Amino acid sequence: MASPALAIRQPLSPDHEYVRPAKAVRSVMDMDRWQHSQAYSDLMGFLVAMNEKVKGAKLGDDCHVSPVTEGLLKVLEKMDQWIDETPPIDQPQRFGNKAFRIWFAKLQENIEEELRNALPANFHRAVAEVSTYLVESVGNSTRIDYGTGHEAAFIMFLVCLYKIGVLEEGDSKATVLKIFVRYLDLVRKLQVTYRMEPAGSHGVWSLDDFQFVPFIWGSAQLVGHPSILPYHFTEPKQVDETSKDYMLMGCIQYINKVKTGLFAEHSNQLYHISGVASWSKVNSGFFKMYKVEVLSKFPVIQHVLFGSLITIDKATTPPPRI
């Protein structure tokens, strides 16, 4: 893959008109419009750009942490605290603890204020639109489930922050290594605390019941590593020793904790991927799989919300070639 610049449009004008995002992909017939939209191009461009920024980087590496990044981390920390304040309720069914709905209502009520506290005043006009994607990124309060569509909403939240100009090129490494990793910790806590159902899980044939993007960016971190090879993520000792440095190893460690039995059986897809010769091939393969298994699936894309920042309008820039 060619190394792109931060592949989203320049910050918007001060008088830009923000809107509340709404659904636009209402039938399978709309999928072609989605795949040729500026939203699709921006999403793929962002994923590829961030992928390039974190190649070879460890999670603990020093990187620029701006006041806005610190503010966003505080927002995610506040969301985490609300989980502690909203313990699961005693209920007969095993999955889908209804306390999640109480937590979710608290999020809806308070998130705009929390984001205004995190962002400089000149960006507050954008909060109503941008916050919608953060709310969408934590799961569905009716079904009490979480999946790759919710994860994609968080990526769209980040894209929005770059589009309005509150995050800049210098924040890119921290966007993955700090903000996204903190989000990942948050949603895992939600999944475990409230026993959330996987949304549209493919079972053993998917990478993971809940996530996809950390496998993409996590494999990028390992590109060119002198001693860790793809087959090492099937070795629990190696995984445990490197999980704090590499996002992908953290994903595997989490799978090993929540699933029982042989890795080759409960994570068949990942087991086969471990046989690929290099991390660069794993990385490009994950991108291609993401396009097919997530971005091309109507059951996922029908829930995407479009506004003035994540727009269904025809793309003026093509998505990056992978």
Image: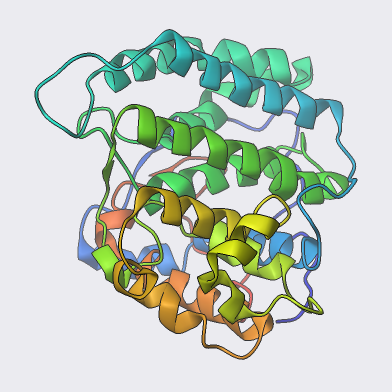
Residue 263 image position (x, y, % from top left):
38, 69
Given residues 77 and 41, the one toward you in this image is 77
Q: Quadrant of the N terminus?
A: bottom right
Given residues 116 and 204, the one toward you in this image is 204
How many marks on residues? 0
Residue at x 69% of width, y 49% of height: 244
Residue at x 63% of width, y 36% of height: 182
Q: In the image as oriented, which residue stretches furthest toward the bottom?
A: 277
* Left or right: 83 as drawn, with respect to 139: right
* Left or right: 182 as drawn, with respect to 62: left
Residue at x 81% of width, y 67% of height: 56
Residue 211 image position (x, y, % from top left):
44, 54
* Left or right: 305 as drawn, with respect to 249: left
* Left or right: 98 as drawn, with respect to 65: left
Whether residue 19 is visible, yes or no, is no
Residue 90, image quadrant: top left
Q: Vertical placement of 177 versus 289: above or below?
A: above
Q: Quadrant of the C terminus?
A: bottom right
Residue at x 69% of width, y 69% of height: 220
Given residues 148 and 305, the one toward you in this image is 148
Residue 70, image quadrant: top right
Q: Vertical placement of 312 versus 316: above or below?
A: above
Residue 256 image position (x, y, % from top left):
43, 56
